[in-house]
Amino acid sequence: GVDVYSGLIMPLERYNYEKLSDEDYEATASEDAEGLVSSFVDKLMSEICWGECPANMLGPVMWSETLSSGDEAIIWGNGVFDALVFITSVNPNGNAPSFSTTSAFYPSTWATVYASDDTLVLGAQGWDWSLDNSASIQTTYLLSFLMNGATTEFYAYGKLSGYLLDQFSLDEVDGYLRVATTIRNWWAWGTAALVEEPLPSTQNFITVLQQVDDAWVVTGQTESLGKEGETITAVRFFDEKAYVVTFEQTDPFYVVDLSDPANPTALGELEITGFSRYLHPIDDSDSILLAIGQEVNNQGMSLQL
């Protein structure tokens, strides 16, 4: 993580200028900010480049286009310097190993990592403002890299609503990124205190995205999977289909058709007691799965030692 608070935010807090009027505070703090930004950047770069600055460092400009503005920045303090990720590749061939590093800032403090033969995707948790719902919504920020031998190269970024369960919630096939997310909570902002809104309690989606220039753009999305209150507990993607388990008291098991990236569709569901945590294919056609999870009673309570 990047400590923005100590270097940029705390010195400009209102209590540090308690003897000034609001108008004088704004003017003085704006003037002080110019010096703080310069010293913060110098300190940050000296820490980042303690050895040698990465040749491929992605600045925060791209996130300024992805993140919402206005009230959202006030509520959550979303910023582009929340964390800095380094991806270091090692080539052991030759007389001495060589290193290649790519780095990027992103608006979160941790991320789920997905990797295929030639792609690395970071799915970072955050919040973003939803104009449609006038509320702040759980959001996954996506940062993707191409892996070529012992080097990595940034190629796309984006965002979508909801949080990932784990690395199996991400999948990339033929240039399409498929993502399974659960939206658990909404937050409303108004003149009163910040409160959590209970509606809707949960929503679960599979979203298909395609790269357009350097951004991930949504091409299709399922309707919400599962009943109210259910969340995704297991997911597994294959070339043209996905299996999704949601759970609150029983275990709906969904089969999703992904053959049309613009129209991912739930084909059917099976309700059984208990819930699955992991799905593993055991045949060549990916039509028979081993589901590993827990049994529960009719109230959704797990009884175990």
Image (tube, grey):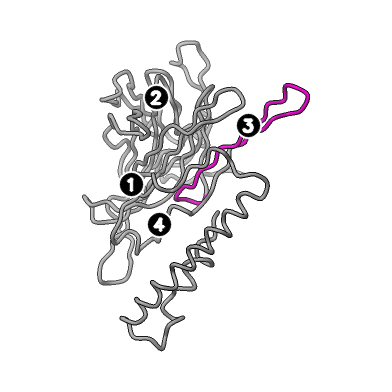
Camera-near label (1 vs 4) is: 1
**3D distance between C-alphas at marks 2 and 1:** 31 Å
Q: How far apart are marks 3 and 4 (CA)?
A: 30 Å
- Secondary structure of the residue carrying tag 2 is strand
Residue placed furthest toward the left? 132
Quarter of the image for the C terminus: give it: top right
Check disc 3 and report the residue beneath it: 89
The residue carrying mark 4 is 78
Q: How many other residues sit within 10 Å of disc 4, few (<14), some (14-19) or many (≥20)?
A: some
Viewer-side residue, 230 vs 59: 59
Residues drawn in magenta: 88-109
Q: Which of marks 1 and 4 is nearer the N terminus?
A: 1
Classify residue 196 as left or right of residue 87: left
Q: Residue furthest right?
A: 95
Q: What crowding class fits label 3: few (fewer than 14 Cα within 10 Å), some (14-19), or many (20 or more)?
A: some
Residue at x 28% of width, y 63% of height: 189
CA separation, marks 4 and 2? 33 Å
Distance between the alpha carbons at the discs numbered 2 and 3 = 31 Å
State the mark number for residue 65: 1
Residue 136: x %, y % from top left: 32, 55
Q: Distance between the residues labelled 1 and 4?
A: 13 Å
Q: Which amino acid does label 3 sit on?
A: Ser
Identify the mark nearer the N-term, 2 or 3: 3
Decide: few, some or many residues near mark 2? Use Cα within 10 Å; few <14, some 14-19, many ≥20: many
Residue 107 or 126: which is nearer the viewer?
107
Callout in the foreground (3, 4): 3
Relative side of 40 to 195, left or right: right
